[in-house]
Amino acid sequence: QMKSQILLLSLVALTMAACHRPSHESKKAPELPTVRVTTETVTLETVRSREEIPGTIHSVDQAMISAKVIGTIDSMPVTLGQEVWQGDLLVSIVAGEISAKVLQAQAQLDQTVRDLNRERDLLTKGASTSETVAALEDGVRVLQAVVSEAETMLSYTKIRAPFDGVITRKIASEGDLASPGMPLLHIENPKRFEVATDIPEMLARPDLVGTEVEVTMPGGEWTGLTVITEMAPAADPGSRTFHAKVAVPEGTPVRSGQFARIRLPGRPIETVLVPASAVSRFGQVELVYTVEADRADMRIVKTGTTYGDRFEILSGLSPEDVIITNPPANLIDGQPVTIDR
């Protein structure tokens, strides 16, 4: 026990000696070098606010292929995602009743034509009347229309592509019973797209068609400026919105069904704008450097809407603050700066 007490006293003595070392043994941190920077004084600027509304990408040319006649689907020689050309066969339907009607109408037409030719020959010999010939001529015209109608119905059993495109949905399969209005396939042109959206009535103005808007996609596939091409003249009474379409430049790497955001011009507002070059990002943190007493002062900010090459600052800066417009990548908070004039 005596040895333990002696050891404890020794440790306490060493600790107190360490705490009373002369202060001149610590080293003073070196002064940071002065950096030349350009600055700008923050002011309130009047801009038109931009309201974001959701939209959906879809093809300009799209069609739901449906049946026009009743029958069994005999073949569907296309696959999901297959590229087809205008006029290509998409669906073949077996409809025996329609084929029989064509044969029946053609047989009746042939018989009436023979009767007409005979009566015309007899008329030249005085053995028939002009009324009989005229009646048969009317009968031929009627039966020609019946044949044409039956052949048209028969043509509906072969459904062909209305335009060049890609098969995006297959709803029916071979062996299914098709009926008039029954959806079978969906086809769309993958080269022409637009954004469909619903504009709230508080933002909808009669002159919006042709207005330039910004479109962004959360996945980063595309961000750019485009125009509103169409807008409904009346609002939907349920949602109080106006359906509109926004152009997508040809060749843009988007696909149908993708989500997009549309920024519309809103009301005039006063806000703080800074050059985009003044904002530095470290992960999710946005920084701006100001000048305080000839030193760099780091500010955490929150940006909002982008206006050309300037960012809206929602928080972190106030009017009359002097910001560094071109902060070097290695600039340190508190580092001395000199301003280029």
Image (tube, rainbow, N blue to C red):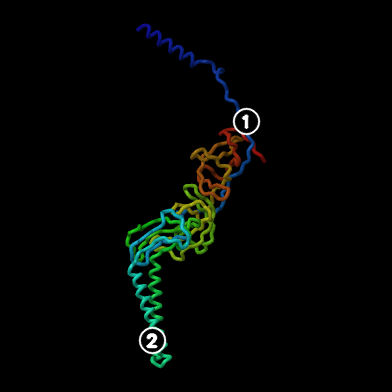
- Taking 232 as reference, is 277 left or right? right
Q: Position of residue 186 (x, y in %)?
A: 41, 58
Q: Position of residue 48 (x, y in %)?
A: 53, 54
Given residues 14 and 325, the one toward you in this image is 325
The three-letter code of the residue at mark 1 reads Pro
Q: Position of residue 254 (x, y in %)?
A: 48, 52
Within 10 Å of disc 1 (Cα), the crowding (few <14, some 14-19, many 20+) is few
Identified at 51% across, 38% down, the residue is 282
The three-letter code of the residue at mark 2 reads Ala
Identified at 56% across, 18% down, the residue is 24
Identified at 35% across, 63% down, the residue is 182
39 in relation to 34, above or below: below
Residue occupied by mark 2: 135
Quarter holding residue 144:
bottom left
Within 10 Å of disc 2 (Cα), the crowding (few <14, some 14-19, many 20+) is few
Counting residues from the start of the chain, the first of labels 2 and 1 encountered is 1
82 in relation to 236, above or below: above
Q: Which mark is residue 153?
A: none
Q: Nearer the viewer, mark 2 or mark 1?
A: 2
Label total for image: 2
Given residues 98 and 24, the one toward you in this image is 98
Q: Secondary structure at mark 2?
A: helix
What is the distance, in whole Å, between disc 2 and disc 1 at their CAs?
A: 111 Å
Residue occupied by mark 1: 33
| Residue 266 at least partly seen | no
